[in-house]
Every structure is written in structure tokens, then in C-alpha cells.
Amino acid sequence: MEAIELIEIIARGEDSRTQFKRNLTNAESVAGDIVAFSNSKGGQILVGVGDRGEIVGLSPDDIRRVNQLVSNAATNLVRPAVNPYSENMATADGQVVMVVTVSEGISKPYADNNGVFWVKSSSDKRRVTSREEIQRMFQGAGLVLADEVPVEGATTTTLNMDHLGEFFAKQYGETLDVALDRDGISVGQLLNNLGLAREANLNLAGLLLFGRNPQRSRPAFLVKAVSFVGNDPAGDKYRDSEDIGGCLRDMHKGTMSFLTRNLRRLQGGKGFNTEGDLELPVPALEELVVNMLLHRDYFISAPWRVMIFDNRVELISPGALPNNLTIENIRNGVSVIRNPLVASFATKGGELPYRGIGTGILRALALTPDIEFESDHDRNLFTARIPRKTV
């Protein structure tokens, strides 16, 4: 870093990736700052700079002591340990500022020696206390998956046996009863073998795929669909509204039905007696609905939302893009499977029109190039926005 770059950074003030410290004396506090940067997007601690950006500098003794303190905090008070990089910068008037750079961690989540998880919150840090947020941190690291978590009370009595039998016959070429009799096992044992249950309880994947009424155990996991009059989501007039529940297959079918009955059909060059084409390509809508249902964050207890306005359609999933995935990435065909168990079964037995090869967004874009995607990390939402054709 050049001195002029240091001055420019200080002039911009503190933010989520830049923190000012007059000095460092408390190793535990420093460990918390390092943890917060490691769990977030990384950043720099400028030691020798006051809260208002005034350069107070460090003495040679301060520099030796701070270096040792930072090293001790990063090695002994952060779990897992990290390796910050420090650099001493001299300003034009001879003041020395230590720049401690902490990279975004590759072994998230990080905690301090007291087991506390910290993340950046604007220019400060905050303690993570919400169980859901901690679960999402472990999910991001691949240490726990939401679709594998058992659902208390969701036993085999909550299964739709007709649906499960239909799936089993299509996927494995024999009836469920024949397979159970041959192997001498119960339905519960079979589901444990398939990874859809843990002991007596279905996991979330088993419930959402084959549950008779998944919303009884997880009431928030349904699609709330509204066709508004106008373009304001706060408007109080609507043409159609529906809460779409059931298993994933039912919700996909119900959402597609809601979209197709509320979107216009355009005659184009067709004759008078033809139905006309839907204003938005059905295959593109199908890909986006599948993506919405499968790749949401299931640690967030909130519904999907489908909103039709006069000028656009919005499909909204709980959970911003995971890990380092960006809008540019997904537009270029990069995909991350957030719920691998649900996704793997969605490809089998005709459950959903989903191949699992990560090209659904590309196919949707090929059919409708003006789709907009938004990953809102503040509200923890992902939105696919499709402009409607004007008549």
C-alpha cells in the first residue's frame, strides 16, 4: 500500500471493510474484530487512526507490542486460527500507521475463544445470537444442511403413501410393497436408507417431497401468490390471490397454474380461433419457479412470494445468494446447490422438471434475456424479476 492510498482510505471513513483504532490493548477485543472480518468480506484495521480519521500514529514500542498482540489474538483467541497481514505505513509528517489486513475466511464460521460468532455490521461488529443465522453460517460452510434436519413430529404417518409409491415405481421399476416385502423392512427403514428420515422422523427433504400436508409441520413453507392492480407492492387492490401449499410437486404445479391464468395471451400472428401464446415463455417461467422452490434458504422460516404487477412478474425466495456466488456468476452459468438432498430427489421419478446440471438460469435467459436478478443480503432475499410485454 502506498502512503497516498492510505490517506485516501482514511478520508473515506470507516465502513464494513475499514476500521480505525487509536491503539490496541485488549487481545480479546482484537480477536472479536478479526473474527467479524473473517466471517464477513474481510477488511483492514488501521491502528494509529482516531475515530474521526485523525492520524495519531504509533511509537516504535507501540508497533512491536501491537504486532505481538495481533499475532497472539489471531493464533490463540480465534477458532480456527487465521493469519492477518500487517504493514507499517509512514505518512508525510512522519507518523506511522499499522495496517492490519484480514482476509475473508475460507473456513467459516469463525468464533472467538469464548465460542462467540461475530460478523461486521456497518463499521462496527455484532454478536450472532439468532439460531437461524448461526445455522446459515454453518450451512454456508457445508457443515450442516437444512434439508437434512429432522422435523420433530413428522413421522411416516404424515406421508402421502400414494405419492411415495408412484415415485418409487417410476424411479426403481417396482412397486413399493414388493420392495418392502422382499427386503423385509418398514417404510420408515426405507426412508432412513434413502436419506429422507432420521430414525422415527422425516427430515425436511422427506417432508417437502412426500409429505401429505408439509405446511402442518412447517406452516411458513408455502407460496403466497398475488396478482396486483398496478405496479405497487403496497397496493391494496388485486385481481387474484392464492396461498399455494402441498409438497414441492404440488407447489410447482399450483404456482405455474397461478402464473398462466393471470398472464395475458397474445394473438401474435395466429388466427382468430387460436388461444394465442402466453406473454412470457412458459419454459422460462418453469425454470425460474423450479429454481425458486429448490434453492431457497430453508433455515429462514418465511414463504416464497410470487407477485404479478402490470409491468413485471417477481419471484422471491428467502435467502440471498450463498457463499461467493454473485449475479454475474449465475448469469454465466455458475451454480451452487444449497439443498443437495432436495435437489437430488427432484431430478428423479419426474418429481419436478429439473435436471440438476445447473443450466436452468441460462435456458431462462435464452428465452427471456431481460430477466433481472437481485440478491439482497440486507433483507436476505433473492428475486427474479421478469418485465411483462406491453400490449
Image (cartoon, rainbow, N blue to C red):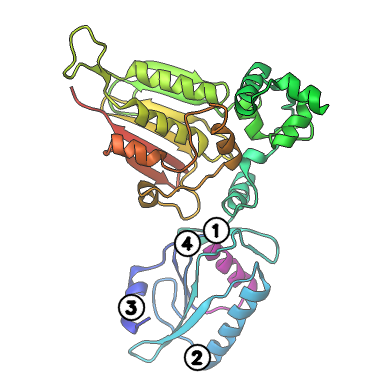
Of the two numbered discs 1 and 4 on the same chain, state the one appearing first in sequence. Answer: 4
Q: Are marks 1 and 3 in contact (CB under 8 Å)?
A: no
Residue assigned mark 4: 41
Does label 2 or label 4 sit earlier along the sequence? 4
Give the residue at x 61% y 70%: 31
Question: Tag 2: residue type?
Answer: Ser
Q: Which residue is mark 2?
A: 59
Please tell me whether mark 2 or mark 1 is closer to you in this view: 1
Q: Single out the mark in the foreground, 3 or 4.
A: 4
Please identify the residue farthest to the left as the structure is shown. Answer: 269
Q: Secondary structure at mark 1?
A: strand
From the viewer's perspective, tell me whether residue 252 is left or right of residue 12. right
Q: Residues within 10 Å of mark 2 (few under 14, many from 20)?
A: few
**Tag 2–tag 1 contact (CB < 8 Å):** no
Quadrant of the snapshot with the N terminus: bottom left
Q: Which mark is residue 305?
A: none
Location of mark 3 (residue): 5
Q: Earlier in the sequence, mark 2 or mark 1?
A: 2
Q: Quadrant of residue 78?
A: bottom right
Residue, far top? 273
Q: CA distance from mark 2 to mark 1?
A: 30 Å
Residue segment shown in magenta: 23-39
Image quadrant occupied by the C terminus: top left
Quadrant assignment, res 273? top left
Q: Residue shown at 59%/87% (left/top)? A: 65
